[in-house]
Image (tube, grey):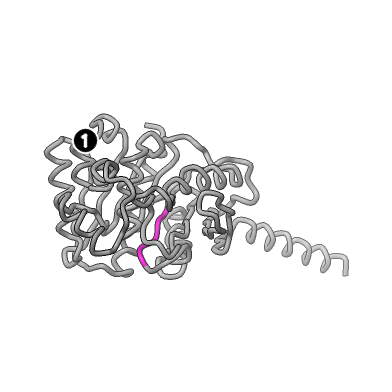
Amino acid sequence: MSRFILLFLNLLFVSLTSFAQESKVFDELTLTSKILNMERKYAVYLPPGYETSQRSYPVLYLLHGGGDDQTGWVQFGEVQHIADKAIQEGKATAMIIVMPDANTGKRGYFNDVNNEWRYEDFFFEELMPAVEKKYRIKSEKRFRAIAGLSMGGGGTFFYAMHRPELFSSACPLSASLRNATFEEFKQGLQTNKVEVKNESTLQPYYDRHNALQQIALNDIEKIKSVKWFFDCGDDDFLFEGNSLVHIAMKKKEIPHEFRIRDGGHTWSYWRTSLPEVLGFVSDTFHQK
């Protein structure tokens, strides 16, 4: 009987150890935002071994597209399966992946034109400090990356443009990149019945949220301090905007990877992008 008990305890220990080594995903976490005056949700992927180790990990902020929330990459993007496989095969380093919820009823990852709705400020001033304190995250530029699809691809591009000192790499996928003229921008505000309280803020706001303007106006060396990876399907309706950004960066001699593959604006496309993203950001995490 004692031999049986010993065998059972050994099997139990092995099972518990294996369980502790598995990755974990929590997709209903919450954060109180004073800036937005509401509770915001977010999801987190913790890599295999996180719960049994004492080490700190690099972090990837992974942004969802319009119409989704923090569960988009979990449910449709299969982030846990894809990240586990990439780490197991040695194609990606173990990392923490943070997926914020931008499904707020106000579209996008940015502050509004009147600076009354301040999602971008929430991201940098509340979300990022909170998660990097809660989890064992290496909070240095070298170990921090950002990626996202569609609306989140736009968020990825502009966040890295606005705060290049924070990100070692940025991977906009099928990115929603704003390239309208200033007149088209103003017409859009009128069409959407947006009351602009201070006309003098329009041009700076336009410059800050127009992809080509960011490339033209920002410090080139700061842009170059971020490693860029773009991926967009050849049948994607956002193909042109992504191509214009590629051309503009090429003219400015800003190093970047630019991928055009067969496909459209679909989850099947982004699921095949994610392993490449994980490998690309892992390269920036590693010591050269």
Residue ID at (21%, 63%): 233
Can residue 78 be spotted in the picture? Answer: no
Which secondary structure type mostly characterizes the magenta part of the structure? loop
244 falls in the magenta region: no
Q: On screen, 145 above or below 84?
A: above
Image coords of residue 139 (percent x, y): 50, 37
Residue ID at (40%, 56%): 63
**Part of the protein shown in magenta:** 62-66
User: In the visual, does 282 lie left or right of 201?
Assistant: right
Residue ID at (40%, 44%): 145
Image coords of residue 144 (percent x, y): 43, 41
User: In the visual, does 285 lie left or right of 129?
Assistant: left
Image coords of residue 229 (percent x, y): 27, 48
Instruction: Tell me which amino acid carries mark 1.
Output: Leu
Image coords of residue 115 (percent x, y): 39, 48
Can residue 115 be spotted in the picture? Answer: yes
Residue 282: image quadrant is: top left
Q: Please identify the residue farthest to the right as the structure is shown.
A: 1
In depth, the one of 113 and 80 nearer the eye is 113
Q: Name the residue under label 1.
A: 217
User: In the visual, does 1 lie left or right of 240?
Assistant: right
Q: Quadrant of the N terminus?
A: bottom right
Helix or strand or loop: what does disc 1 sit on?
helix
Q: On screen, 267 above or below 49?
A: below
Residue ID at (28%, 66%): 269
